[in-house]
Image: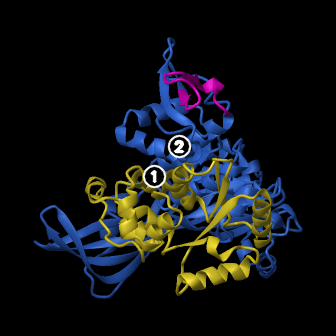
């Protein structure tokens, strides 16, 4: 395997927790260098320049975004393309609905019981607010809770319980 | 459970200040704009509660430095705090399975000091607590109390003048069998206060939870925790972080707290593999860290740990392990790499779900990630008095942001005001 680099654009710090603990190690099996890049407070002009730089390096990239209030994945991709002109539309990955849904998707029933967290069969439509309401009382920090559930994250379970996560894993052949 | 509003007059660099606070507040401003003077409002009230008024004034350097130097003794100094602190109190068990209770939803505390002609002597000229509450019908089953329905509202105003406590005003929805002594017992009204002691020292007697002594003020100096600390220190973290080893020892001895500490530390400092506190021969404590770069069991003593690592550890302790309602941190970004600042801000926002967090900063990265709605800008007006504004309310700021100028760019260029 030659030297291969991939940059993964993620929105903010919670995405970074998930991607650094679950996704980055999977990509590291195929890439020599995997770098996460947070874009939440970065201007569109800088994102544009960053993509140009990645192209010049002949590296790969993935742009991860939440679906938020967009009606469908295609609409969200078009919206991103309109904002960042030089982005390749097929490199955009849309998380449904927010990263919290991906975090909770891999939480197996046995761990739910141990943490006293409710079991969610389907996390496709889980919002940040709903996720916050699901955090067991013993956790007074959302960050602590996310890190704790990711310690026992099951990719197979998450694929079944969140469509966009399953799509992502299959698209990049991460298993 | 937080302070919603503050009003002060003739306090340090403030002539007349009124600001609203949220759960997470980032105070920014140029050097000498008055950021630390805002922190001193909380410090003064906390010290008054703990040490009494005379000591609290002395701890500010005396009345000359407590009030504004230019205004001096010509005007009163006043402080008013509006809190949404909720607490319930059972008033009566009218029937076996039913009772009445009150639940406060707003407490306003105001204290004003007047100055005598010589300028140095002072007296309390206004000292008042106003509480607004809901009246609730309770269902009582053994030890279980259930709030059934809100049946009315009311308020009570309690004041203190020259040692005497009295109820100035009492109002309650018609037909509810609660009188003022159900709220403030008669024996409290018969108490004689030292004329120089404000009402807040009576809060425990009034069964009002104390807000001010639940305030933690931190201004960490990473050099302090690098030294060994005597094992007989406070269990709560000191303002400068000097007793960090003692606090960490207590955390690390508790399995659940230890788990939480490691999750939060490694989220920001992933190279931390283990932590411990060493008891030295002279019975002092020193904390130590094992990094992933070193062989297992090779701990670095605090003196060899980076300033940033110490600061992050102290911040996590202050934000997540201190049972306070408010945590104020001066310049939390000290010695922390810019890449980690967004995580520190995220952590402060996360902690603000359970406590009010106020920070002061000069750091553009903090400003960038704080969220415009959480920023308060301190500046000086034409007469040199400190004023506080919210950049989120400025039309010009919104236009700049819409045109892709970052908040941090506006902050650096001094365009947030």
Where is residue A59? Give x, y as percent. Answer: 71, 58
Q: Colour of chain A?
A: yellow
Where is residue B246? Give x, y as percent. Answer: 49, 30
- Horizontally, residue B397 falls left or right of residue A175, namely right
Assign a secondary structure to mark 1.
helix
Seen at 66% across and 78% down, the residue is A80
Instruction: Provide the residue span drawn in magenta.
Output: B288-306
Near-viewer residue (B171 or A140): A140
| Residue A108: assigned label | none
- Horizontally, residue B16 falls left or right of residue B246, namely right
10 Å neighbourhood of mark 1: few (<14), some, or many (≥20)?
Answer: many
Near-viewer residue (A85 or A103): A85
Near-viewer residue (B102 or A147): A147
The chain drawn blue is chain what?
Answer: B
Residue matched to label 1? A147
Near-viewer residue (A102 or B192): A102
**Which residue in the rendered view is the most extreme toward the top?**
B281
Q: Chain of mark 2?
A: B
Q: So how many labels did they put on this image? A: 2
Q: CA distance from mark 2 to mark 1?
A: 10 Å
**Which residue in the rendered view is the most extreme toward the right?**
B382
Q: Chain of mark 1?
A: A
**Which residue in the rendered view is the most extreme toward the front?**
A1
Residue B121 falls within the magenta-colored stretch: no
Q: Can residue A31 be seen in the rendering of this structure? A: yes
Residue matched to label 2? B266
């Amino acid at each position: 395997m030659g030297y291969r680099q991939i940059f993964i654009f993620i929105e903010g710090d919670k995405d970074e927790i998930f991607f650094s603990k679950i996704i980055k190690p999977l990509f590291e099996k195929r890439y020599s260098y995997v770098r996460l890049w947070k874009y939440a407070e970065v201007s569109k002009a800088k994102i544009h320049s960053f993509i140009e730089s990645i192209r010049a390096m002949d590296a790969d990239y993935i742009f991860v975004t939440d679906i938020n209030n967009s009606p469908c994945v295609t609409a969200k991709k078009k919206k991103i393309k309109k904002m960042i002109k030089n982005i390749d539309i097929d490199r955009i990955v849309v998380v449904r609905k927010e990263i919290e849904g991906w975090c909770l998707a891999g939480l197996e029933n046995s761990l739910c019981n141990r943490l006293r967290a409710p079991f969610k069969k389907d996390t496709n439509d889980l919002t940040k607010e709903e996720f916050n309401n699901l955090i067991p009382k013993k956790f007074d920090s959302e960050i602590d809770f996310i890190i704790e559930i990711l310690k026992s994250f099951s990719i197979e379970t998450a694929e079944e319980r969140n469509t966009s996560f399953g799509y992502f894993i299959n698209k990049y052949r991460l298993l | 459970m937080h302070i919603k509003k503050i009003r002060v007059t003739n306090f340090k660099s403030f002539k007349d200040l009124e600001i609203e606070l949220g759960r997470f507040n980032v105070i920014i401003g140029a050097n000498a704009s008055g950021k630390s003077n805002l922190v001193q409002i909380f410090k003064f009230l906390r010290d008054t509660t703990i040490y009494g008024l005379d000591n609290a004034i002395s701890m500010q350097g005396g009345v000359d430095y407590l009030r504004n130097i230019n205004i001096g003794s010509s005007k009163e100094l006043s402080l008013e705090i509006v809190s949404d602190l909720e607490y319930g109190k059972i008033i009566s068990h009218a029937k076996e399975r039913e009772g009445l209770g009150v639940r406060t939803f707003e407490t306003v505390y105001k204290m004003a000091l007047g100055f005598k002609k010589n300028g140095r002597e002072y007296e309390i000229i206004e000292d008042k607590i106003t509480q607004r509450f809901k009246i609730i019908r309770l269902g009582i089953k053994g030890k279980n109390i259930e709030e059934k329905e809100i049946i009315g509202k009311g308020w009570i105003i309690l004041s203190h003048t020259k040692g005497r406590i009295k109820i100035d005003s009492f109002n309650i929805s018609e037909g509810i069998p609660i009188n003022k002594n159900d709220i403030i017992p008669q024996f409290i009204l018969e108490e004689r206060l030292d004329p120089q002691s404000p009402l807040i020292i009576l809060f425990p007697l009034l069964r009002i939870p104390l807000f001010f002594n639940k305030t933690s003020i931190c201004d960490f100096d990473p050099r302090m925790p690098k030294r060994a600390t005597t094992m007989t220190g406070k269990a709560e973290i000191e303002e400068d972080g000097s007793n960090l080893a003692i606090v960490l020892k207590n955390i690390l001895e508790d399995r659940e707290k230890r788990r939480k500490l490691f999750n939060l530390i490694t989220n920001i400092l992933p190279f931390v593999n283990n932590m411990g506190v060493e008891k030295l021969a002279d019975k002092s404590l020193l904390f130590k860290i094992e990094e992933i770069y070193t062989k297992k069991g090779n701990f670095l003593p605090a003196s060899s740990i980076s300033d940033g690592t110490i600061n992050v550890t102290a911040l996590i302790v202050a934000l997540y392990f201190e049972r306070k309602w408010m945590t104020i941190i001066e310049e939390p970004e000290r010695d922390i790499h810019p890449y980690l600042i967004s995580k520190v801000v995220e952590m402060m926002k996360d902690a603000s779900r359970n406590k009010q967090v106020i920070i002061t900063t000069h750091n553009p990265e903090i400003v960038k990630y704080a969220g415009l709605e959480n920023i308060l800008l301190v500046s000086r007006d034409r007469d040199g008095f400190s004023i506080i504004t919210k950049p989120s309310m400025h039309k010009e700021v919104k236009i700049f942001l819409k045109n892709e100028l970052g908040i941090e760019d506006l902050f650096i260029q001094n365009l947030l005001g």
